[in-house]
Amino acid sequence: MTVAKLDLAACPVPAWLPERQTQTLFGALAAPVNRIRFIRERVDTPDGDFIDLDWNAPALQLRSRRNQDPTLAHTAAVRWMTPADQALLNSDTQQPALILFHGLEGSSQSRYAQSITQYFLSLGWLVAVAHFRGCSGFPNRLARAYHSGDSEEITFILETVRQRAPLAQWCAVGVSLGGNALLKRLGEAPDQYHWLHAAAAVSAPIDLVAAGNHLSDNLFNREIYSRHFLRTLKPKVLEKSRRFPGVIDVMRINQARDLRDFDNAYTAPMHGFKDAADYWYQSSSKPWLKKIQIPTLVLNARNDPFLPEQVLPGPEYGSPSVVFHQPAQGGHVGFVTGMWPGNLTWLPKRLARFFSESQKTETLRT
């Protein structure tokens, strides 16, 4: 039986970040990055909502922040996309391109998004960061939001960027929640995405039942990580409740103390699931990894505080197109390396190396 490859090569985390929590928190909150600017495009969805895409490429002309559109002052974008920008996206038949799906409550301002964008721009790539609904700095129009198994949204975003730059050589990266959603979609509809040259998922909670329980039941996770996410999730939903009276159980939202509470009160019922357990079970990407047909890197540190090591997949869980890279250290989307104050270059370099190797393999086959 042909199975996935397993890579246990280390991420060389520094000695001054000795364990999972410091690696995760420093990477998310303190690691130095250059602030990358974007051009923003708003795209209407078929159900009457919108998503925001942040674009950057060597050919796009970006003004300094001093000339930033005031409507975008709280974002990483400096202006809205113009027809001239759109024409540039489709001007190079050989342009390598990356679509990035962020994690829970992430955005193009997230440190991992900034570091990945910066690195791939330095290689001459076109980069698009897709914002899930309500994550771009603007409330979305509908009562619904986004979730870990939203295959229709992944499909819509992938097809949208392909339409914008149909001749580009696209790769896709999903981080955490975005990684799980991307993997699930690639496994559900493997024949639809051969136009993607390769894909990668970083710290994806591929077993959402295990991850959701761990984030809700573990004391440190509940008091630190769940509280961090709820700090923005709850106000967003309460704002929706004022626009859509009677649709959202405000009392349960106010009383939510962990992600299980929040998903039971809002995410599950709003998006067609029975409860949090049903949502987590149906949205997990792990059962779909055997179906993936394009070269795909699934990168999970074995000390990720969000996902217990014992549920990480072995080679038998993936198709021959999948590589499971499971370094011992790195935390959750941390992967900080170097001397103080560290850097976030290991992750984008790992992604770029995988994409390059996949392209070479594809060239040999053809």
Image: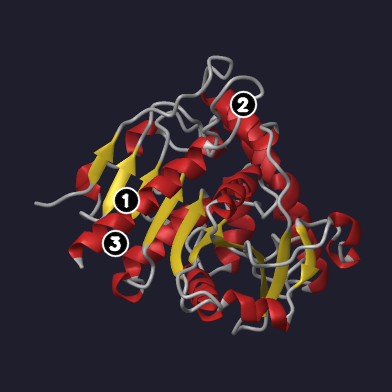
**Looking at the image, residue 209 lies above or below residue 97:** above
* Quarter that holds the C terminus: bottom left
Q: In this view, does 230 lie to the left or right of 303?
A: right
Comparing marks 3 and 2, which lies closer to the viewer?
2
Residue 292 numbered tag: 3
Q: Which residue carries the number 1 mark?
A: 357
Residue 278 x, y percent position in the rendering: 44, 58
Q: Which residue carries the number 2 mark?
A: 342
Comparing marks 1 and 2, which lies closer to the viewer?
1
**Circle 1: residue type:** Glu
Towards the viewer: 100 or 155 = 100
Task: Give neighbour class at mark 1: few <14, some 14-19, many 20+ (Cα, 10 Å).
Answer: some
**Looking at the image, residue 90 lies above or below residue 103:** below
The answer to which quarter of the image holds residue 295 is bottom left
**Circle 2: residue type:** Gly
Q: Which of marks 3 and 2 is nearer the N terminus?
A: 3
Res 287 seen here: no
Comparing marks 1 and 3, which lies closer to the viewer?
1
Q: In this view, does 153 lie to the left or right of 47?
A: left
